Image (spheres, rainbow, N blue to C red):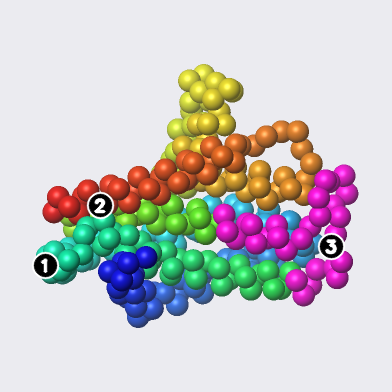
């Protein structure tokens, strides 16, 4: 990573650390994750906990990503910092990448700390020996939960990139907030509803369902969790998604969103 990208990323990290809302976001993630763990009736094992956290993460992660990213570019634009940056030898692509890296580091920390604490809690309360699940092909182990954390962070980075893109497209702080909420609605439920409507209407056939599900970031994330986390311990003949297609779908959203942000800032 170049020094210019590091400088922009460091500035974003400092901005997040100084923001009063950051502590509230961290406490909110902690409250939700531990609330789910303690309210659940499941055994304190890694696989049941990942199952219980999957649905809340589908709502919490996009909300956190939007909160962190919707003001990034538009704030620099309204304060005139984009004009100042234009006088420095920093390309637009490096600026966008630096913004993304800085906010991505913050998002990763805000998600990883609470989930890692949950993991430590499970390690101290789970049976001292790995629990083989009845009629299942695998073993309930910490690796399952580590993989779940990694996929959850990846999902968050994708939504963060989408939010940075709409921040670059926005013309005012208010429009950035509105577009951020649109992204939140699309990721949480909008794209899934479109896919469901296509299936119900016969537009999407069974042979295309796995590929179409990867178009929705949430469905792609859910499919990856089912296929690479839950299926490692639960034997099933039903394929929920294609891991390769789902990962490609998420990566396309991430790279495409950063490209949109770069083009938008270049045209300002």
Which of the two residues, 262 or 126, is positioned nearer the viewer here? 262
Residue 43 position, x and y percent, is 79, 62
Position of residue 242 relative to residue 170, above or below, is above
Quadrant where the image shows the C terminus: bottom left
Residue tagged by mark 1?
Answer: 87
Horizontally, residue 45 falls left or right of residue 193, namely: right
| First-in-chain label (3 vs 2) | 3
Residue 131 position, x and y percent, is 85, 59
Q: Residues within 10 Å of mark 3 (few under 14, many from 20)?
A: few
Extent of the magenta region = 123-151
Q: Does residue 68 appear anywhere in the picture?
A: no
Q: Quadrant of residue 81?
A: bottom left
Q: What whole-number distance in Å separates the C-alpha atoms at marks 3 and 1?
A: 59 Å
Horizontally, residue 148 falls left or right of residue 14, namely: right
| First-in-chain label (3 vs 1) | 1
Q: Does residue 27 appear anywhere in the picture?
A: yes
Residue tagged by mark 3?
Answer: 130
Res. 262 mark: 2
Res. 189 mark: none
| First-in-chain label (1 vs 2) | 1
Name which residue lies at 53% across and 52% down: 58
Q: What whole-number distance in Å separates the C-alpha atoms at marks 1 and 2?
A: 17 Å
Q: In what element is the residue under mark 3?
A: loop
Q: Residue furthest front?
A: 2
Q: Quadrant of residue 19?
A: bottom left
Q: What whole-number distance in Å separates the C-alpha atoms at marks 3 and 2?
A: 48 Å
Horizontally, residue 133 falls left or right of residue 228, namely: right
User: Does the magenta-highlighted stretch encompass residue 261?
Assistant: no
Quadrant where the image shows the N terminus: bottom left
Q: In what element is the residue under mark 1?
A: loop
Name which residue lies at 27% across and 52% down: 261
């Amino acid at each position: 990573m170049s020094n210019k990208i590091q400088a922009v990323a460091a500035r974003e990290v400092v901005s997040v650390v100084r923001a009063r809302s950051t502590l509230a976001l961290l406490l909110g993630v902690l409250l939700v994750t531990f609330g789910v763990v303690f309210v659940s009736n499941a055994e304190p094992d890694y696989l049941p906990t990942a199952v219980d956290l999957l649905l809340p993460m589908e709502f919490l992660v996009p909300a956190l990503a939007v909160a962190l990213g919707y003001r990034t570019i538009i704030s620099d634009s309204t304060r005139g910092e984009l004009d100042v940056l234009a006088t420095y030898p920093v390309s637009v692509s490096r600026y966008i990448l630096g913004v993304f890296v800085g906010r991505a580091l913050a998002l990763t920390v805000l998600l990883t700390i609470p989930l890692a604490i949950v993991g430590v809690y499970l390690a101290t309360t789970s049976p001292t020996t790995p629990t083989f699940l009845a009629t299942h092909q695998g073993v309930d182990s910490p690796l399952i939960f580590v993989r779940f954390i990694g996929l959850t962070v990846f999902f968050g980075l994708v939504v963060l990139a989408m939010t940075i893109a709409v921040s670059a497209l926005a013309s005012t702080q208010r429009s950035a907030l509105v577009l951020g909420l649109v992204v939140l609605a699309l990721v949480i439920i909008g794209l899934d509803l479109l896919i469901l409507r296509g299936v119900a209407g016969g537009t999407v056939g069974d042979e295309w369902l796995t590929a179409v599900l990867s178009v929705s970031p949430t469905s792609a994330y859910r499919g990856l969790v089912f296929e690479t986390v839950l299926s490692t311990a639960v034997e099933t003949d039903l394929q929920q998604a294609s891991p390769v297609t789902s990962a490609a779908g998420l990566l396309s959203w991430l790279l495409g969103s950063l490209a949109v942000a770069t083009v938008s800032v270049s045209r300002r």
